[in-house]
Amino acid sequence: MLRVHFTGLDLARLRLAGDPDALWESVLSLHRLRDKQGESIFGDWRSETRARLNGETRLLAPLVPSRGYFPDFLTPPEGVLGLDSGMQALRETPPERVHQELGRLSTVRTLPAWIRSMAEGDSRAFAKLTGALQAYHEAAIAPYWSHIQAQIEADRAVRGRALLDGGADALLSSLPPMMRWRAPVLEADYPVDRDIHLGGRGLLLVPSFFCRRTPVTYVNPDLAPVLVYPARHMAECAPAEVAAPRSLGKLVGHTRSAVLGSIGGGCTTSELARRVGVSAASASQHAGVLREAGLVLTLRNGSAVMHTLTPLGAALLRGGHRGPQGRTRVQPVAQSSIPERSTPATM
C-alpha cells in the first residue's frame, strides 16, 4: 500500500495537471501494449499501433519492464507541457543521475550492452534512447492525442467539480476507488508498502489515459511529488456525463445531443469540440442553441469560455437514459465520430 501524508500546506498546494503528460502516457502505454487488460478500450489501439512500430518496443522494453522499477528520468515534469518540452528535459538529464537510476535497474535485471553504455555516459547510446522514445510516441500516442486529451479533460471536469463543491477534501475523495482519502493520508493500492511525506511541497495529480490498476509515482523521494492516476474512461463514467440518450437525439439532433452529453461537469469550447469531434465553430454554435433553450450555461473568463449544464439540461440527460453505455475504443485523431513506481511501474 502507498500512503501519501498531507499537511495543511500540502492541501493548499494540491494541483491537478491541465493536460495529459506526453512522456507518462508514452511510458505507461508500453505496459498496455504488452498486456491484455482493457481489451474493449485498448484492443484496437494495440493492433493499430503494432502495425506502425518498427522495433521501438524491443529497444525500450528493458528500460520499461512489464513489472517493477523503471527510471524516473524517463518522465520529467516537463512532459505535461508537451512532447518537445519533455524530450528536451530528458536530453538534459545529468549523466550522474542516468548512471544512478540505470544502476538501480541493473540490480533487478540484466541490461543490454547499449543501455550499460548509456549508464557510463555514452552520448550515442542516450541518443538511441531518445530517438526510440520519440519514434514510439509518434506511432503509439500522437495519432490518438486528441482522444486522449478529451478523456483527460472529462476526468478533470469531474475532479474540478468536486473541488468547487467541497474543496481539496472532496477532490481527493473523488479519486478512483483504488485510492482512498482518510485525512490527512491518501492511501492507494500499490505493489509495495511505501510512505511519502509531502512536507509542505504539495502534490501534482496527473490523470493518465494509459495508467491502470494502481497509481504511479517517482521512486526518488527528493523529486517534486507527483501522483499519476488512472483517468476515468468514457465507458466508465456516469451516463449523464458523457452520453445522451437516443430519444434525446431524435428530439434535438444527434450532434446537438452529443454536445449536451459531452459537456459533463464543464468544459471550454475547444475541449467540447475535441470531445464531440467537430470544429470549434460548430461546437460554439450548438452550445449557443442549447444555451438559448435553457440547457447550458456559458460563462466567460478572459479569453476562455466555459460551458456547464443547467439543472434542466442535467435532468434531461438523466431522465432519458436507458441501459449501459456501448463499447469504447481509442480513436485516431483523423476520425470524427464520438469514441464510444517500491516502484512506479506495476499499473
Image (spheres, rainbow, N blue to C red):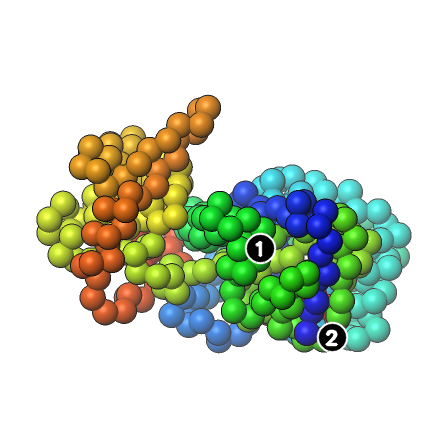
Query: In the displayed structure, does residue 92 sit left or right of residue 134?
Result: right
- Residue identified by numbered label 1: 169
Q: Position of residue 40 (x, y in %)?
A: 38, 70
Q: On screen, 307 above or below 258? A: above
Q: Quadrant of the C terminus?
A: bottom right
Say which residue appears at 72% left-offset and 42% top-offset: 89
Q: Nearer the viewer, residue 150 or 294?
A: 294
Q: Quadrant of the N terminus?
A: bottom right
Query: In the displayed structure, does residue 121 sit left or right of residue 184?
Result: right
Q: Judging from the image, what secondary structure is the residue with disc 2 in?
A: loop
Q: Position of residue 66 (x, y in %)?
A: 63, 73
Q: Nearer the viewer, residue 334 or 276?
A: 276
Q: Position of residue 160 (x, y in %)?
A: 49, 47
Query: In the displayed structure, does residue 207 sit left or right of residue 294?
Result: right
Q: On screen, 346 above or below 271? A: below
Looking at this rendering, what residue extends furthest in the top direction? 302
Q: On screen, 296 above or below 11? A: above
Say which residue appears at 65% left-offset and 39% top-offset: 85
Q: Position of residue 234 (x, y in %)?
A: 38, 59
Say which amino acid is labelled 1: Asp
Contact between labelled residues 2 and 1, with CB atoms less than 8 Å apart = no
- On the question of residue 83 being in view, the answer is no
* Figure quadrant of residue 244: bottom left
Numbered circles on residues, count: 2
- Residue identified by numbered label 2: 193
Q: Nearer the viewer, residue 82 or 216?
A: 216
Looking at the rendered image, the disc whose residue lies closer to the viewer, 1 or 2, is 1
Q: Nearer the viewer, residue 208 or 319?
A: 319
Q: What label does residue 252 carry, if any?
A: none
